[in-house]
Amino acid sequence: IVLVGGGVAMVLWALRRNRGERWRTLIERVLIRVPVLGSARTDIALSRLAGALGAQLQAGILVTEAWPTAAAASGSPLIRRTVSGWPPFLESGHTPSELVFASGVFPDLFSSMYASGEISGKLEEQLRWLTRHHEEEGFRKLRLASLWAPRIFYGLISLWVVFQILTIAGGYSATLHQLLDE
């Protein structure tokens, strides 16, 4: 428990001190591997991305100019780093939907909905749907994690307590057998 608390305190200190992009990337790499929390964090980042893209498109900003700002608004270093490499491809005539598909960073649902919105001319509508969908999914997964995390934590503590009790009882039993044999 002390080690976990110390680890959490160290991570919070590092984030509070704004240690830069490397820390945020490291945190994202670690959290993405946590079963429910990783996908919840990804969904929330995609929701922010879609919301920022939609708001900028409504304001009349070109989609090619909106992507870097929206990627920064997502809060995901992976998305920001991916999108930061797109300008040469966009200037050479590739569409954002092609780059979304090719990047491998975005889930199939996001890529497909974005591409269909781009082709049909209803990109803003698709982005609103993606914003809602990923926000709902992200918060649903966070609620699930907050429901099960304490149960798992208490279960692990209970197992540790049972192990300690059995260890003490085994030691006591061995001592009694040794005394009775003498």
Image (cartoon, grey):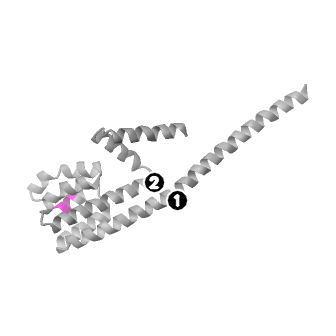
- Residue 104 can be seen, yes or no: no
- Could you tell me how far apart the alpha carbons at marks 1 and 2 are, in whole angstroms? 14 Å
Which mark, residue 66? none
Q: Pinpoint residue 105: horizontal percent, then vertical percent.
A: 29, 55
Looking at the image, the residue that sits furthest to the top is: 182
List the single residue furthest toward the left.
92
Q: Residues within 10 Å of mark 2 (few under 14, many from 20)?
A: few
> Of 44 and 174, which appears nearest the observer?
44
Q: Which residue is mark 1?
A: 147
Q: Is residue 114 above or below residue 78?
A: below
The nearer-to-camera label among 1 and 2 is 1
Q: Quadrant of the N terminus?
A: top right
Residue drawn at x 54%, y 37% is 2
Left or right relative to 38: residue 63: left
Q: Earlier in the sequence, mark 1 or mark 2?
A: 2
Q: Quadrant of residue 56?
A: bottom left
In the structure shown, which secondary structural element does the residue marked by tag 2 occupy?
A: helix
| The label number, if any, that marks residue 35 in the structure image | 2
**155 on left or right of 50:** right
Q: Residue type at mark 2?
A: Pro
Mark 1 Cα-neighbour bin, 10 Å: few <14, some 14–19, many ≥20: few
Q: Quadrant of residue 138?
A: bottom left
Q: Which residues are magenta?
A: 94-99
Residue for point 21% across, 62% down: 53
Quarter of the image holding residue 51? Answer: bottom left
- Expressed as whole percent of the image width and height from the top left, the position of residue 159 reads 65, 46
Question: Which amino acid lies under the numbered mark 1 shown in the image of this protein?
Answer: Leu
Q: Position of residue 89 (x, y in %)?
A: 13, 54
Seen from the viewer's position, the closer of residues 123 and 106 is 123
Judging depth in this view, the residue of 3 and 167 nearest the camera is 3
